[in-house]
Image (cartoon, rainbow, N blue to C red):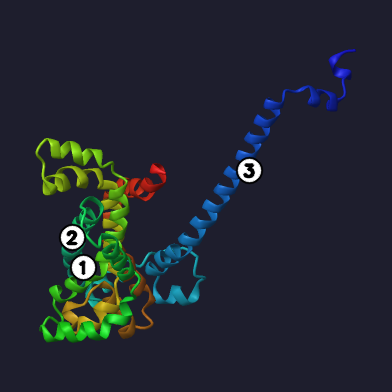
Amino acid sequence: MSLSTVPPAVVDAALPEKRRRAGWGTSHRDYIKIGLWIALVIAVLVWSVPIIFMVFTSLKSEADIFGTPAFVPPWSPEWGNYVEALDRGNLLSAGANSLIIALFKVPIGLLISAAAAFALARLRFKRQRLLMGIIAMGAMVPIQVAIAPLFQVINGLDLLSTHIGVILPYIAFGLPYQTFILYGFFRGIPEELDESARMDGAGNWRIFFQMILPLSKPALAALLILDFVATWNEYSIALALLQSQDSWTIPLAIQGFQSQFTSSYGPLNAFTIMSVFPVLIVYLLFQRYFVEGAFAGAVKG
């Protein structure tokens, strides 16, 4: 009997069990890969639709905005919307305020959080777990609950409408979350490295600055990006503490521009797009470390 006359069922039964399982596993992986690609395409579409709408609207004249569909590209770009946003929206002043606040708040807050996390993860003292629990609970307190007493404190210190009056609360509210994240990352670094450094005469500060911080670059970079974005976009505290227009940050400037020029959709969208550039630059600078930090815990298992 030739091979061509053998029924397919007999051939399938003659195949080794391992080969059939391998084929099923490959097919299973292909289905998962296809599903992931579909999910990725859907996510890209969901996130890109508002961005495309903003870009198209920022380059249209008022007549084109109301006379053409939203997702029709502008055939004659209206670049004057960006000039008008810079001129009428006080973007440069608000951007400078947001940048100054972020450049001071983010590194100072990260340094204090890292030092606190190092003490909790590496040093041994009484009530250590209780203190860690209090810090973790502090990360759960909503900012809105403390705005009224915070306003009274800052007003009593005569720090309203100042950079330092906003930087201090930003640091305080950011410490619990950052300390909690860095504590878990520092605990994943082997303590044998500390013991080796101490045998060479290194103290706590030297271990912290020369060993722990360099090993924690991915986590620090991820927190830096997230903290910079959160500081740049923060609205509630800034609304309560920044009373004068000269001290406004980007979110307050956008709100002021929108309330003053309600129907100027072109300049408003141009204003919003330009306000995103600093955040995008920071992300591109630390992108590699951000990805490493995001998956560091998963890789360590």
Q: Are marks 1 and 2 in contact (CB under 8 Å)?
A: yes
Q: Is mark 3 on a helix, strand or loop?
A: helix
The local crowd at label 3, few if under 14, some if 14 to 19, many if 20 or more residues have their Cα within 10 Å, is: few
- Mark number, residue 24: none
Give coordinates of residue 25: x percent, y percent. 64, 35
Q: Is residue 146 visible?
A: yes
Residue that protrudes farthest toward the top in the picture: 1
| Front-lying residue, 127 or 141 | 127
- Mark number, residue 171: 1
Q: What residue is at 12 percent from the left and 80 percent from the top?
A: 159
Q: Do the residues labelled 3 and 2 touch (CB within 8 Å)?
A: no
From the viewer's perspective, tell me whether residue 17 is left or right of residue 59. Answer: right
Q: Badge 2 is on which residue? A: 112
Name the kind of residue labelled 3 in the image.
Answer: Tyr
Dot in front, 1 or 2: 2
The local crowd at label 1, few if under 14, some if 14 to 19, many if 20 or more residues have their Cα within 10 Å, is: many
Cα distance between the residues tagged 3 and 2: 47 Å
Q: Is residue 256 above or below residue 110?
A: below
Give coordinates of residue 170: x percent, y percent. 22, 70
First in sequence: mark 1 vs mark 2: 2
Q: What residue is at 22 percent from the left and 38 percent from the top?
A: 193
Give coordinates of residue 236: x percent, y percent. 30, 78
First in sequence: mark 3 vs mark 2: 3
Give coordinates of residue 241: x percent, y percent. 21, 81
Name the kind of residue labelled 1 in the image.
Answer: Ile
Name the kind of residue labelled 2 in the image.
Answer: Ile
Q: Is residue 264 above or below residue 22?
A: below
First in sequence: mark 1 vs mark 3: 3
Q: Badge 3 is on which residue? A: 31
| Front-lying residue, 1 or 59 | 1
Q: In which quarter of the image is the N terminus?
A: top right
Dot in front, 1 or 3: 1
